[in-house]
Image (cartoon, grey):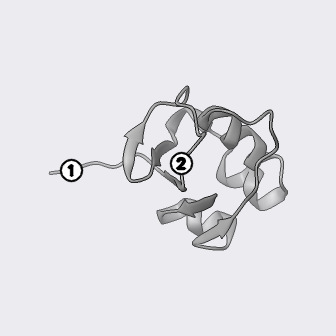
């Protein structure tokens, strides 16, 4: 699956995107976030406050409990403000 990072998540992880094969027990966006946080210091730093991270599957905003099966892209980004 293509995993994309935006804004300060990209800066903390150190890359804009990567291809990841998640293990079978990773079935939701929240599972993926926890899995990524365990991949190393930079990921732990990027995902240290998972409650504020937003996600999109195939360019559609989703909640943490959304299943990732069948998606080609998972994107993570910080909260945004508009005006």
**Within 10 Å of the Cα at label 1, are there few (<14), some (14-19), or many (20+) other Cα atoms?**
few
Mark 2 packing: few (<14 Cα in 10 Å), some, or many (20+)? Answer: few
Q: Which residue is mark 1?
A: 82
Residue 32, how many percent across, how many down?
68, 42
Q: Is residue 35 left or right of residue 32?
A: right
The residue pinned by badge 2 equals: 71
Helix, strand or loop at label 1? It is: loop
Front residue of 28/5: it is: 28
SS for callout 2: loop
Tell me the quarter of the picture where residue 28 sits.
Answer: top right
Give the vertical position of 72 relative to 38 (above or below): below
Residue at 47% x, 64% y: name it. Answer: 7
Residue at 74 percent across and 49 percent down: it is 36
Seen at 60% across and 62% down, the residue is: 2
Say which label, 1 or 2, has the lower sequence index. 2
**What's the residue at 59%, 37% (across, down)?**
29
Q: Nearer the viewer, residue 6 or 4?
A: 4
Q: Give the quarter of the image for residue 48.
A: top right
């Amino acid at each position: 699956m293509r995993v994309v990072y935006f804004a300060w998540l990209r800066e903390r992880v150190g890359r804009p995107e990567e291809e990841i094969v998640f293990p079978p027990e990773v079935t939701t966006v929240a599972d993926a976030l926890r899995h990524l946080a365990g991949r190393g210091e930079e990921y732990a730093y990027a995902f240290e406050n998972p409650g504020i991270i937003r996600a999109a599957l195939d360019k559609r905003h989703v909640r943490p409990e959304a299943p990732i099966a069948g998606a080609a892209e998972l994107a993570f980004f910080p909260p945004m403000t508009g005006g």
